[in-house]
Amino acid sequence: MTAPIFRCGRFTFDLSRTIVMGVVNVTPDSFSDGGSHFDAARAIAHARQCVADGAAIVDIGGESTRPGAAEVPDADELARILPVVESLTAAGIPVSVDTRKPAVMRAAIAAGAAMINDVAALTAPGAIEVCASAGVGICLMHMRGEPRTMQQTPVYDDVVGEVRAFLVDRARACEAAGIERNRLAIDPGFGFGKTPAHNLSLLRKLETLVATGYPVLVGLSRKSTLGLITGRPVGERLAASVAAALVAVAGGAAIVRVHDVRETVDALKVWQAVKGDLDRR
């Protein structure tokens, strides 16, 4: 069987084993690490450390999408991320940019970004067109509403079915616009317009999304649902985040987006070694 691949610009990722995406927030207000890397030099250093620790790709964000977050002007978002994107791509590091704005996508791609990670699933006017012509990889995420309002009593009749239907619809729209299937990944959007119960349902039934045939990206690292389960504040959710990542991998996740790269990579190495041994029996 041919190994599944994910094409992102000049990079091709083998997804026969789960890969790790390292989070680099160049923001003052992200829920987990706002301000920690809020200048280019610190963000670049952190991204390089993520790669040294085993991340296959780093995800650069210049606008917080935490619950209640206000929108950032395009110019401010670009001023935050472009120096980081340019430096990392010049060093040959695969870079994803976490943005929902076509103008930011266009500038980030021109600066060398290999992937666009969009919490709005390319629904903004012109977003699909920007990405279709660029050859970048794309992650389409499900979000109910917008960051400012998304956690105001989200309601679903069937959260798994509705998220799946939305993501398949968006992926088909991308393919209809000329974006190759092997450039697309999907993300159920844990914590984006969902209650803890919704998040757990999606994690339990992740194979429903995997069955679509699109690589599934999962971002559970340090999320509030893990805090609710463990009673830990955001800075003390390492063990819970690694456990959640492994549950996602067991469910078929192809990419895990994490803040704590080294620890997640080590856990994955153990998982993959044991899984490989079991597969040979």
Image (spheres, rainbow, N blue to C red):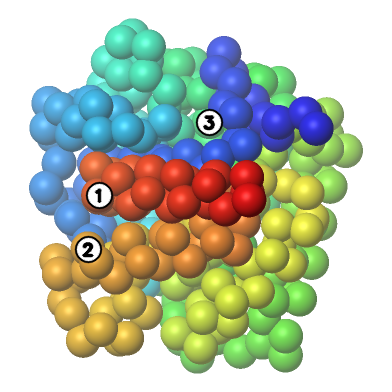
Residue that label 2 marks: 238
Q: Which label lies toward us, 2 or 1?
A: 1
Of pointers 2 and 1, the one earlier in the residue sequence: 2
Residue 88 tag number: none
The reply to whether discs 2 and 1 touch (Cβ–Cβ < 8 Å) is: yes
Q: CA distance from mark 3 to mark 1?
A: 24 Å
In this rendering, position of residue 25 left or right of residue 233: right
Viewer-nearest residue: 276 or 26: 276
Residue that label 1 marks: 263
What's the amino acid at mark 3?
Met
**In the displayed image of the protein, which residue is found farthest to the front?**
281
The reply to whether discs 3 and 1 touch (Cβ–Cβ < 8 Å) is: no
Q: Secondary structure at mark 1?
A: helix
In this rendering, the answer to whether 97 lies above or below 67 is: above
Residue 115 tag number: 3
Rendering quarter of residue 90? top left
What's the amino acid at mark 2?
Leu
